Image (cartoon, rainbow, N blue to C red):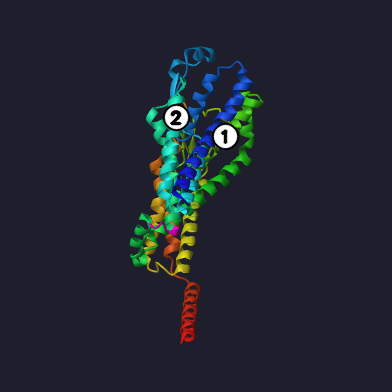
Amino acid sequence: MQRLIVVLLAALDAAIAAAVGLATVLAPLTLLWVLAFGLSADWGSLWPVSGTLWQFAHGVPIEVVLPDTLLSNLAISKEAAQFGLSVPPLAILVFTLLFGARSGRRAAVAGTWYTGVASGAVTFTLITVLVALTAQADILRTTLWTAVVVPASVYLFGLLAGAVAYAWAEGDSGPIDRIHDVVDGWGEWTPVPTEAVRGAAIAMAAMMGAAAVGVAAMTLLRGGEVVALFERLGVDALGATMLTLAHLLYLPTLLIWGASWLAGPGFALGTGTAVSPAGTELGVVPGIPVLGLIPEDSTMWMLVSVLVPIACGALAGWMVRSRLVWERTANGYAPRAAIAVGIAALSAGAAAIAATLAAGSIGPGRLSQVGPVAGPLALAVGIEVLIGSAILLLAPRHRDELAEERTDRWREEMAEWEGASGTD
């Protein structure tokens, strides 16, 4: 594929990714503007609010500054007139990340991934600059450099992840191949980096799946509490629809909270609070309907939940070991131990990043500390995944596994012998 076409397609992908995210925010706000304020509303405020919320959805912290007229009308104290929001709805961030990975992979398939990555990154950065310069709201405020750097970094990470993953697996006749050639000379240690990354991806995907099952179970068990909170808010059909849409956008954030609960450290819902299997200490919970899913108390039996991350690590270890047996590599204990440590370290790093994104402030006062803490979650996930993956990777080789390996080797030797005989 010609380099110019790759550049244009990567730029188009970046524009589509930004446009879809902006439309996801702008469309419901436009409907709210029309139904709530009518055609005579102040349309000049719609775009600044939408652009700022799009930045917030990519992890940009925002500062809420309420005007004096609103404070007097709602009887809000002046101490709550200014506060930060830093717990974003991660659904839009995940979409941008995955769309960037798709674009990066397509550029790598075309054979010039660095050109496609550069084009996509530059285009998306220009869009973020345009949004940052034009979407400056009075009530919702952001710092200019974070409004540009954070969304652009999300898309760039997706681009690099998709491009490098494909180039590592299929080759790129460039820098990735040169690095791959160096790693191929490590002998039994060659599969360590690849399998560590693969195992960590499996472990984290399994943990998110387990968290999703947990959130679904709590929805069935405590759905009545959610409905009751909806009713207490007294919102109309439009308000209920907007709240439901916001809950859906926050679903990835809730899954990270659920994964932190399964791992043991849990999460906070305000300063001095804790929600974990070891115990639940809550003060006054904000009347957000989705928070009705949180259990009011804990039992010692809930500590069994820490077996879930261990099982996720064991699943990763089993899948990696099956691949190693199939390829007949890394037969020694030392390379497999290194793979187990790599899986645990990468899983801990991913958990720390996820916790950082899903924690922060959702309001004034005690609500400035909400979500999981990155350090304890990373430590817990690392230890638990290490235990599970090490059990499967370092367990003695079963006789069936050895017999299958001997059979495969015998078949290869017979095929080589038959080929040599046919040649003679």
Name the residue rendered at 33%, 65% in the picture: 185
Amino acid at pointer 2: Leu
58 in relation to 382, above or below:
above
Distance Cα–Cα, label 2 vs label 1: 28 Å
- Few, some or many residues within 10 Å of mark 1 (<14, 14–19, 20+): some
Amino acid at pointer 1: His
Which is more toward the observer, 25 or 367?
Answer: 25
Residue at disc 2, secondary structure = helix
Helix, strand or loop: magenta stretch? loop
Does 178 sit left or right of 417 as displayed?
A: left
- Few, some or many residues within 10 Å of mark 2 (<14, 14–19, 20+): few
Label 1: which residue? 247
Give the x, y percent position of residue 350.
42, 46
Which is more toward the observer, 266 or 243?
Answer: 243
3 in relation to 315, above or below:
above
Give the x, y percent position of residue 233.
61, 24
Q: Is residue 4 magenta?
A: no
Judged by depth in the image, the label closer to the viewer, 2 or 1, is: 2
Does residue 169 appear anywhere in the picture?
yes
Q: Which residues are magenta?
A: 169-173
Which is more toward the observer, 158 or 401?
Answer: 158
Name the residue rendered at 58%, 17% in the picture: 41
Does residue 368 appear anywhere in the picture?
no
Cβ–Cβ under 8 Å for marks 2 and 1: no
Label 2: which residue? 130
